[in-house]
Amino acid sequence: MAKLNIVLHEPEIPANTGNIGRTCVATGTRLHLIEPLGFSLSEKALKRAGMDYWKDLDVTTYLDFEDFLEKNPGAKIYYATTKAPQTYTDVHYEEDCYIMFGKESAGIPEDILVNNQETCVRIPMIGDIRSLNLSNSVAIVLYEALRQNNFDHMNLEGHLRNYDWK
C-alpha cells in the first residue's frame, strides 16, 4: 500500500510538529523532518501536542535537504508556498507523493522553489495575511491529497456507540 508523505523543512515550533505528527498517524501518512529543527524531538510541547500518538508515527529525520533528496530518489515533491501561482487543488497528488512545507518564520527557501516552480502550490487567502498556521496548512493540503486518492485505506464510516444509522 502506497502512502502519502509530509515533509517539514526546518520546522521551528514543537506544537505544530506534534499536531502534524498526530494528523499523520490518523491518516497513515509518513512524516519527514529536515534539520535543523527548532526544538528537540523529546521536547514536552511536541509530546503534548502529539500526545500518545508519537510512538505510532512513521517519522524520518534528515541532516539537510540534500540528504532528504539522496534518501528519496525520484520522489515526486509538491512544495507548499504562499508564492506559488497554482493552488493546492490545481494538481493531482499521486498516492506516494511528498508534500513539503517550510519553517514557520520563512517558508521553503526560495532557491528550492525557483528550481521546482511547476510543482509549487498555495492555499488561497484574502488580504495581507502572511500565511496560515503550519499544522492547519498541512491538514488542508493533506486531506485534499487523501480525497483525490479516495481516502484509500481510511475508515469512511462513522458510528455512534449505541445507535444504528438508518
Image (tube, rainbow, N blue to C red):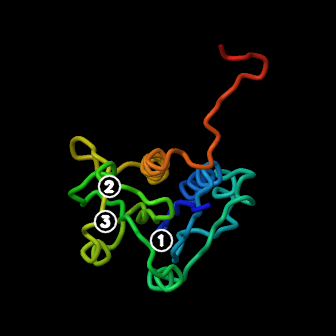
- Between circles 2 and 3, the one closer to the viewer is 2
> Residue 89 placed where, x, y %?
33, 48
Residue occupying image coordinates x 65% and y 68%:
41
Marker disc for residue 119: 3
Quarter of the rendering occupied by the C terminus: top right
Residue occupying image coordinates x 69% and y 25%:
159
> Residue 108 placed where, x, y %?
36, 69
Q: Nearer the viewer, residue 96 or 111?
A: 96
SS at mark 1? Answer: loop
Quickly name the residue at label 1.
10
Q: Is residue 109 left or right of residue 163?
A: left
Q: Residues within 10 Å of mark 3 (few under 14, many from 20)?
A: some
Q: Are marks 2 and 3 in contact (CB under 8 Å)?
A: yes
SS at mark 3? Answer: helix
Q: Are marks 1 and 2 in contact (CB under 8 Å)?
A: no
Q: In which quarter of the view is residue 15 placed? A: bottom right
Position above or below: 73 against 91 = below
Q: Earlier in the sequence, mark 1 or mark 2?
A: 1
Amino acid type at image mark 2: Val
Q: Earlier in the sequence, mark 2 or mark 3?
A: 2
Marker disc for residue 91: 2
Q: Nearer the viewer, residue 141 or 12?
A: 141
SS at mark 2? Answer: loop
- Between circles 1 and 2, the one closer to the viewer is 2
Task: Give the Cα distance between marks 2 and 3.
Answer: 8 Å
Q: Earlier in the sequence, mark 1 or mark 3?
A: 1
Q: In which quarter of the view is residue 17 placed? A: bottom right
Q: In which quarter of the view is residue 37 placed? A: bottom right
Amino acid type at image mark 3: Thr
Quarter of the rendering occupied by the N terminus: bottom right
